[in-house]
Amino acid sequence: MTNNLECTIGTLGQKWDATDKKQWFELQTIKRSYQDEVISKINTLSSHFDIVQYGALSVDKQRYPLFALKSKHWQSDKSTVLVSGGVHGYETSGVQGALRFLQNEAANLDSNYSDYFNVLVVPCVSPWGYETINRWNPDAVDPNRSFYQGSPAQESVALMNFIQSLNVDILVHVDLHETTDTDNTVFRPALSARDAIEQKVWNIPDGFYLVGNTLNPQAEFQQAIIDAVEKVTHIAPADDSGKLIGVDIEQFGVINYPGRELGLCMGLTDANYVTTTEVYPDSPKSDDENCILAQVAAITGALDFILKKHALL
């Protein structure tokens, strides 16, 4: 299936120019509220976490401030954990999963990860994408292919600059994503039109899976996350060719990508333990709440593994 609205932009066989991208931008509409669904939740956490505004999107600086939340009593002798969500704004459970993790942390004072780690959470990297339910930013650029020097995506640049400004060694980075049916019906046709390259439509994995770092896969770490998530939702099986989204399976529910080479958010830091989550909210076996719980389980599964491995518990 294709989306005719997206595919009629531009000239067939030619990459989009600035006029085409402007036309695409003007067709986008606000579908939900960043203020109501994200910022309002962030504000309720101010007594438990330090809220830092690290930038704002130029498309509307008042409407789209960029926020990170840091555990209070930040200490240089603690390892730092980074959780990022909403790099692709349309991937709802990544944003809401990051917020739910923070809410659970604030409520569970008896067993708080902030006792062991400096916790840093960036719940919505791409707020314009969140409101318009888009993978791309206002310039028709994919932020999750743009984490590199000279990046064209201001969302990526803002986060890279913020992380660098903290001047801390990050031990763990969990980047929260999801895959929806619109990947095949909307965004891949749009990508094909934008870049004038035929895009194959793949079978979306039915269930949760992880993307590890090819250069540092950390198989035990990935396995611990799969074990934790499997308690709340199903893990995506390999397809008939033993792959997920065209990539060879490394272990059950896990594939690897060269994160930094591809400009992915997972390549943002030099963290020793890195993973990207993927859930499938359109599965008949799942729903929005289940996907949020899966994201939270992935974060806690990752941190519990580190605590046990480093004998911090």
Image (cartoon, grey):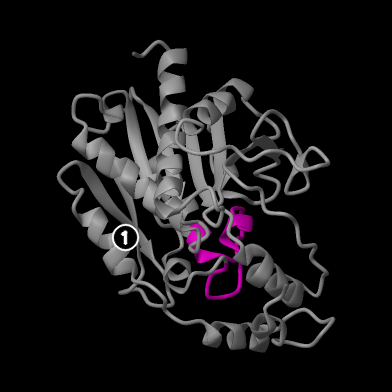
Judging by the rendered image, the residue that carries numbered circle 1 is 38
Do we see residue 270 in this rendering?
A: no
Q: Give the x, y percent position of residue 186.
A: 64, 72
> Which quadrant holds the C terminus?
top left
- Name the amino acid, label 1: Val
Between 115 and 211, which is closer to the camera in this rendering? 211
Give the residue furthest to the front.
Answer: 284
> Which quadrant holds the N terminus?
bottom right
Q: What is the crowding at mark 1: few (fewer than 14 residues within 10 Å), some, or many (at least 20)?
A: some
Taking the spot 47% from the left edge, 28% from the top edge, the residue there is 228
215 left or right, relative to 221: right
Between 149 and 177, which is closer to the camera in this rendering? 177
Do we see residue 121 in this rendering?
A: yes
Q: Give the x, y percent position of residue 7.
A: 71, 82
Classified by dominant secondary structure, the portion drawn in magenta counts as loop
Image: magenta residue range: 136-157
Q: Give the x, y percent position of residue 312.
A: 36, 14
Taking the spot 38% from the left edge, 47% from the top edge, the residue there is 98
Q: Give the x, y percent position of residue 47.
A: 14, 45
226 left or right, relative to 99: right
Between 287 and 221, which is closer to the camera in this rendering? 287
Q: Is residue 308 magenta?
A: no
Taking the spot 49% from the left edge, 37% from the top edge, the residue there is 173
Residue 216: image quadrant is: top right
Taking the spot 59% from the left edge, 37% from the top edge, the residue there is 235
The kind of secondary structure element at disc 1 is helix
Q: Determine whether 98 is above or below 90 in the image.
A: above
